[in-house]
Amino acid sequence: MNTRSRPVIRLSDVIQNAVTGRRFLGSFQSFPKSNSKGTKNYKAGRESKLMGKPLRSKVRNSYADMLGSKGSLVGHSILRGQTLRRSFLYVPAHSERFINKALTSTADCIVLDLEDGVAESQKNTARDNIRNLLHRLADEGYRPGENKGAELCLRINNEGWLRESSWRREGTENIVAPTDTLDKDLELLGLPQGFRLTVVVPKANNPVNLRYISNAVMVKRLQHTSYEEAIAHRLNMIPIIETPHGVMNIAKYASFGGWFSGMVFAAEDYCASLGIPRTEDYSNMLFARSSIVNLCKMMGLSTIDMVCQDFKRPDVLLEECNDGLYHGFEGKQTIHPDQIDIINKAFSPRPSEVQWARDLLHEVEKRPEDGAFEFNGKMVDRPVFRKAENILARCKKIIEFEEARFQTEEAIEAAKEVKEDKVFIEGVESASQETHDQSVTAEGRRGYGK
């Protein structure tokens, strides 16, 4: 056998091609840069070919970009550029009162719920409330006392069980929502005001489902805005793992690193799909939870743990928070505003941890030539030094986030002044341009008369 005729296949090349060279874009479908039929035909066709052909992304990063780096050593996703997601508050969107109350809460993420928290008869009302909120935020901005720092999310009605053929219009290759309910949900994401929303995808049994949602949203966006404007805003998604299908497909998400920024574990649906009770020590969910944590830590993404249903038992909530924290989760879902402060505190560095980190790093500065030494009765070395650095860096980012969280009267007045100045300047520039045009026209007429 002539072994020299065989192609040389390197494992690193396989990983790079599988993850970055052969994957889809997150919020839009990419198209070839050149076209033999000409630029005009290419521009005319790129908006109509929203089909699922894997092309190279030049705007998304994947975990393959981190191979060989030390990015995973920082531990927490906010130290790798992700949004802070300690408290993940679900708000049934059919109630304006619930929405307004959530906007004044201290939640890191406010999830406007269209799925389980809303009855079928109330879903249209919920969509109207969300649409009104988006228009209000776009026109007026946040009001005094509202949590402008919170990430605004939308949980849609997704059916992860549907086959690929369900996402294609009969007789064509165009991507469409497979159900009327989901189609109406995606309409909100197609609005220019909806570009700010992060999409929470329930029953994400397969990461390919994210691609279909993304392409379907792109079709909606093109109905309201230009192609360039539509692709300029990345569609951010957070899948919910809540079935055995989703758990067994977790490894596949590694090839879709640019499509999502975090992952949620839903205990109730997961236990129901397995036909098991939710045990007090959570041991029967360890495999699923650990799989999510390990994937997300590898990729630098947020990990959000299960809901605590005993919202009137702060002791139970705190126990669950600590359990999630020790397993590597960075936040927790919540169904009641009274749970938020406990969750935020539990998933932040404790004062004792911060003091320990400061003392250790101070000792490191005094002993630059020692790679390892005894500190507080324990032997410490570089991994422990790095842990202390990460604690202080995370604490600093959390403090900065919380200081700028709420909208103030002063900020609103300052924004109004900037807006008025901008309108004034645009008016002056417009008047100046008009005077210039008139002058040029008059000059041309005199020259013609000569």
Image (cartoon, rainbow, N blue to C red):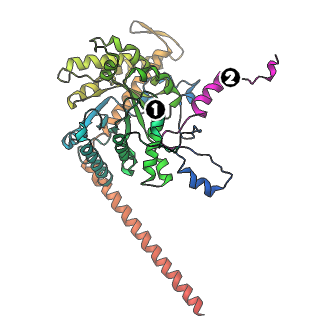
Classify 10 Å Cα crowding around label 2: few (below 14), some (14-19), many (20 and above).
few
Q: Look at the numbered disc 1 and give the secondary structure of its residue.
A: loop
* Quadrant the C terminus occupies: bottom right
State the residue at coordinates (66%, 56%): 38
Queried whether the magenta region covers residue 447, the answer comes back as no
The residue that mark 2 highlights is 10
State the residue at coordinates (57%, 30%): 19
- Mark 1: which amino acid? Arg
Percent coordinates x, y for residue 34 in the rendering: 65, 49
* Quadrant the N terminus occupies: top right
Percent coordinates x, y for residue 421 in the rendering: 36, 62
Q: Look at the numbered disc 2 and give the secondary structure of its residue.
A: loop
Asked if residue 106 can be seen in this view, the reply is: no
Res. 163 mark: 1
Against 129, residue 333 (above or below) is above
Dot 2 or dot 1: first in sequence order is: 2
Queried whether the magenta region covers residue 13, the answer comes back as yes
Against 34, residue 110 (above or below) is above
Span highlighted in magenta in the image: 1-29
Classify 10 Å Cα crowding around label 1: few (below 14), some (14-19), many (20 and above).
few
In terms of image quadrants, where is residue 393? top left
- Mark 2: which amino acid? Arg
Horizontally, residue 265 falls left or right of residue 313, namely right
Which tag is nearer the camera, tag 2 or tag 1?
1
CA separation in Å, label 2 and label 1: 34 Å
Percent coordinates x, y for residue 194 in the rendering: 37, 47
Horizontally, residue 86 falls left or right of residue 20, namely left
In terms of image quadrants, where is residue 18? top right
Is mark 2 in CB contact (under 8 Å) with mark 1? no
Percent coordinates x, y for residue 135 in the rendering: 31, 52
